[in-house]
Image (spheres, rainbow, N blue to C red):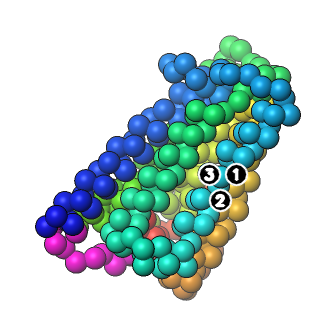
Amino acid sequence: MTGRAAALIYGLASYLIFSLSFAYTPAFIGNFLVPKTIDVGPESGRAQAVLIDMILLGLFAIQHSIMARPAFKRWWTRIIPAPCERSTYVLISSLLLILIFWQWRPIAPTIWRVEGWPAAMLTAIFGSGWVIALASTFQIDHFELFGLRQVADVWRGAAGRVQALKMPLLYRLVRHPLMLGLLLAFWATPHMTAGHLLFAVMNTAYILIGVRLEERDLVAEFGASYEHYRERVPMLLPRLFGRGATASEARRGG
């Protein structure tokens, strides 16, 4: 019972830290409400700022890529309890995101700046990107994706769940709506600075590499079912014409 309670508290704490860091992210990137943002903060020499920002983004990308791989999970769960594996991933990701907020160096030169209705349109796309990203997590299993389901199952003494293929709503349009939402949020801004551009470019590169690594794992896990889904549904950009996947086709559960 003590171990179950510890796992539940750990999972809840990890989820709380994730929720706070995720809520801060749109304000950080959008330059509103918070004192330290992607364009507001301590200044450094330009070369130093580029180096620091690239290291921060690189650490975040490497951690995501390595800890998400099945081989790492098998090794890692020899050290930590398996139900806490996802919560640990979420916790480390959130702490690295907080490190980015803390140590990020703005790079001031303007790449583009628009006003009026183009600015309003880009701001709307920015907000829509975050809505899409968050909504996509609830359309599969938000609480499993961020580790709460696993520790709650341990607390209740429930058997471990088998990951199933399913494909709700947004997942019938693109295979990775979470990443599509993030890309919209990263790029849609009325004022693109050099620092914001660096952030957007490096995260786009990570997403394009990361989804291919993830899909390799999904094919290995689900075989022909996922291959068929991949043939029918585009990766990140919805098809303007043609039929997407039907409700009976499958998609991963988290």
Dot 2 falls on a residue whose secondary structure is helix
Residue tagged 3: 60
Residue 18 x/y as whole percent: 42, 45
Is 200 above or below relative to 175? Answer: above
Left or right, residue 31 beside residue 152: right
Q: In the image, what residue type sits under mark 1?
A: Gly
Report if residue 253 lies within the magenta region: no
Judging depth in this view, the residue of 244 and 234 nearest the camera is 234
Dot 3 falls on a residue whose secondary structure is helix
Judging depth in this view, the residue of 242 and 145 nearest the camera is 145
Could you tell me what secondary structure mostly forms the magenta stretch?
loop
Residue 219 x/y as whole percent: 57, 80
Q: Callout 1: few (<14), some (14-19), or many (20+) C-alpha neighbours within 10 Å?
A: some
Residue tagged 1: 58
Residue drawn at (83%, 23%) of the image: 109
Q: Is residue 167 visible?
A: yes
Is 48 above or below relative to 146? Answer: above
Q: CA distance from mark 1 to mark 3?
A: 5 Å
Left or right, residue 3 beside residue 90: left
Extreme residue toward the top, this view? 116
Residue 155 x/y as whole percent: 18, 65
Residue tagged 2: 62
Residue drawn at (20%, 65%) of the image: 4
Residues at circles 2 and 1 in contact by the CB criterion of under 8 Å: yes
- Magenta span covers which residues? 154-163
Dot 1 falls on a residue whose secondary structure is helix
Which corner quadrant holds the N terminus? bottom left
Q: In the image, what residue type sits under mark 3?
A: Phe
Q: Quadrant of residue 17?
A: top left
Residue drawn at (86%, 34%) of the image: 47
